[in-house]
Amino acid sequence: MQIYTIHHRFLQSVFSVSLLVILTQFHSLAHADGVPWENLSPQQQETLSPMREDWRDLPPNRQERLRQGAERWNNLSPEQRNRMQDRMQRYDNMSPDEKGRIKERMREFRELPPEERSELRERWRNVPPEQKERIRERSQRMNPEKKSRGKQR
């Protein structure tokens, strides 16, 4: 009986240690694809500084998307950054209904076939800057009622 108990305890210990090793490896594998904060460029770290405290806890794919976003942001001209900040500020000031409509439009756009999305982007790129500005201004002035009527046309 005593040999059985010693053997049983030994097997339990081996099993526990093995399980611990396996779990540790899975944990390190799960975080292996992440982007270590130290690997970010100084510009990316500055851009992402509000996230520094939580960086290690973010999923690797989120870290990568944020890194790419910071890279794009850092490559924008000052004028482009100002426009983006204005857009973000306008979005922050929108009502939940307005934000919902925008999210719905973005979802609809993402669901378009790639060729159609490319065509729409190309058409927008070919619109003269003055006309783009008029479109933006008109869109900002429209109230939700007018916007939905314009969509139905």
Image (cartoon, rainbow, N blue to C red):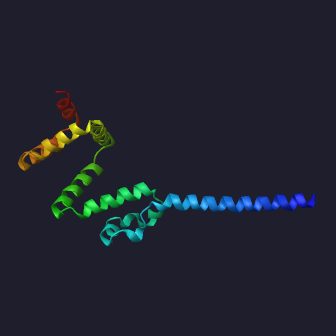
Residue 14: image location, x then y, percent:
74, 61
Quarter of the image for the C terminus: give it.
top left
Quarter of the image for the N terminus: give it.
bottom right
Q: Name the quadrant containing residue 20.
A: bottom right
Number of residue marks: 0
Residue 142: image location, x then y, percent:
17, 39
Residue furthest top as drawn: 153
Instruction: Left or right? Give the position of 60 relative to 65.
Output: right
Residue sitting at x 20%, y 27%: 152
- For this rendering, which residue is in front, 52 or 85? 52
Residue furthest right as drawn: 1
- For this rendering, which residue is in front, 125 or 97? 125
Instruction: Left or right? Give the position of 115 relative to 46.
Output: left
Q: Is residue 124 above or below residue 16?
A: above
Residue 140: image location, x then y, percent:
17, 44
Residue sitting at x 6%, y 48%: 130
Residue sitting at x 10%, y 48%: 133
- For this rendering, which residue is in front, 113 or 109? 113
Instruction: Left or right? Give the position of 94 relative to 51.
Output: left
Q: Name the quadrant containing residue 126.
A: top left
Residue sitting at x 45%, y 60%: 33
Instruction: Left or right? Give the position of 22 relative to 72.
Output: right
